Image (tube, rainbow, N blue to C red):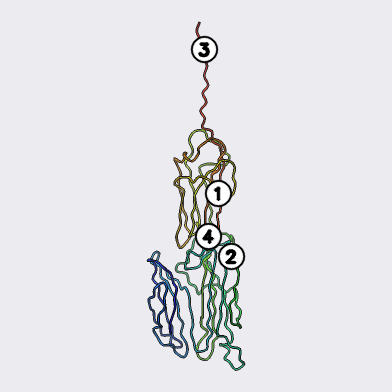
Amino acid sequence: MSLFATAQNGTTYVNFIRQVQFPSGVQWDATVAASGEQLSNLAIDPGGARFELWTVQSTPLASYILDSRYVGTYIPMAEVTLRSEDGSSTIPRTRADRPFYVDVTVDGLHDGESEPEASKKVRFLRHVQSYGANGTGIGIDRTQATLVSQSFIKDNGSTTLTYLINAVPGANRAKVRGEERFSIFSLEDYQAPASQLASRFIQIWPVADGTITGIVNDQFIRYSLPQLTLTLNDLYPNSTTYAQVYKGNPSLGTNGTIVPGSALVIQESVPQNRVLTLKNYESVFDSDGRWTMEIVTKTPFGTDRLAYVSFDIDRTMKLNTNMSTIE
């Protein structure tokens, strides 16, 4: 049998396909490139075989199963694809406040009365699992995921499911982190147990937040600007964040002047926390008056303001003198 695989690309990842034979349980692993095609290492037994696509990240060390397919004599073929507004990662991901989409395709289902039951329908499952506070998903036991729903698919074809809200548990919905997994399983029959035909998961990451300390709203500044601390939490793995200033009161969507030393470009696999200290930034204020400083983060989902403060600057020096004459 010929296999086609698309996995994680990059020097920090190693990809392999695991073939598991049924009913013997014999297993064979083969290292593969990020994309390509090759013949299976073992012949397909009457009970079928499961093919799993794995990627192993070296730093930090973690392994992820990206896809799984079961191939049998009359078992249907199935495919699950997960999509979000962030298309920058091989492992699908999105933010806790954003929707995602599940494309499901099933082919090879039969409808004859004499056909085996396992050839006429498949089971569609949705699982959810929290990573916990500050969790990254590395090393989690996916057998502990919670089953949210299940149904049967009895017709060939493709359909798209839209999920406006994720189901990862957590009181603060903006700060949940975890994953949702969607799987298609064949039915058990006399030749093979119920087997996974396809499975994909999407990671859910929290919404970022930030604070500006060292200055308060409506503060009046005379001569020197204070040292500031920017505290940034849960920056999205694909994001650009910076502090900017502009004249006047807060106004969403304003393009200001970026404060030197405040720009952060994040290209990671998990959210990031940062603390920045700003000093000697007087050059961005070209005049006295009312100013606003805000923290802005740009992600695949748009531009968001994390924090802001408005203050007044008056650096004019006034001298009071008396003049007298002696006659």
The N terminus is located in which quarter? bottom left
Q: Which of marks 2 and 4 is nearer the N terminus?
A: 2
Question: Which residue is outermost to the bottom?
Answer: 114
Q: Which of marks 4 and 3 is nearer the N terminus?
A: 4
User: 321 above or below 248?
Assistant: above
Q: What residue type is labelled 3?
A: Ser
Residue on which disc 2 sits: 99
Q: What residue type is labelled 4?
A: Pro
- Report how far apart the C-alphas of labels 2 and 4 lie in the structure: 13 Å
User: 169 above or below 242?
Assistant: below
Secondary structure beneath label 4: loop
Residue on which disc 4 sits: 300
Residue on which disc 1 sits: 307
Q: Residue at x 46, y 91 (%)?
A: 46
Secondary structure beneath label 3: loop
- Report how far apart the C-alphas of labels 3 and 1 lie in the structure: 54 Å
Secondary structure beneath label 2: loop
- Report how far apart the C-alphas of labels 4 and 3 lie in the structure: 69 Å
